[in-house]
Amino acid sequence: MLARIERIRNQEYLFCDTIDEQYVDMVDRVGPTYRLWRAATLEQTEWLERYQKRAATRTGSAGDSEFTRMQAEYAAYRSFRIQGRHCLNWQRPLTGGAAHGDSNTGSSVSSGGDP
């Protein structure tokens, strides 16, 4: 009976050691991508907050033409989309293929008509 308990205990220790090793390996592989994603997300959030503050102050601005405001809106949208595509490219090593797209055709989430 004691020998059986000892064998089960050793198997449990081996299992826990294996899980720990796999976790360390995963952290080593995913860590750089995760840190890059966090930095990009923080940068994007800060930019969006600054942009919204700027947009709120110029809402009633009579000096800007409609075309200038429209260009600024499109530039902000395009920057946001480009940032999103870079995030998808960072995910590819983690998923083993195209992120949210067809790996056979190489298509991404949506082409959207952006240059």
Image (spheres, rainbow, N blue to C red):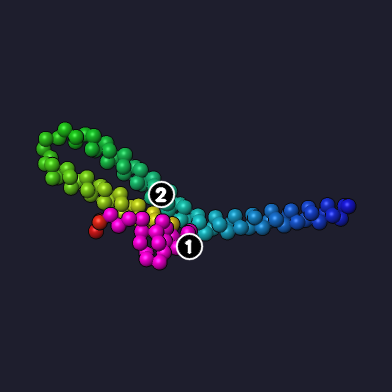
Q: Report if residue 90 is visible in the image.
A: no
Magenta-colored segment: predominant secondary structure: loop
Q: Is residue 36 above or below residue 45?
A: below
Residue 41, image x, y percentages: 39, 47
Residue 84, image x, y percentages: 35, 52
* Tag nearer the camera, 1 or 2: 1
Q: Earlier in the sequence, mark 1 or mark 2?
A: 2
Q: Verify whether residue 26 appears in magenta.
A: no
Q: Nearer the viewer, residue 85 or 24?
A: 85
Going 31% across and 42% down the picture, which residue do you hit?
A: 48
Q: Report if residue 32 is visible in the image.
A: yes
Q: Is residue 38 left or right of residue 80?
A: right
The residue tagged with tag 1: helix, strand or loop? loop
Name the image quarter holding residue 111: bottom left
Query: Few, some or many C-alpha atoms within 10 Å of disc 1 (few <14, some 14-19, many ≥20)?
Result: few
Residue 91, image x, y percentages: 43, 57
Q: Verify whether residue 95 appears in magenta.
A: yes
Pointer 1: what residue?
96
Pointer 2: what residue?
39
Q: Which residues are magenta?
A: 92-112
Name the image quarter holding residue 73: top left
Query: Few, some or many C-alpha atoms within 10 Å of disc 2 (few <14, some 14-19, many ≥20)?
Result: few
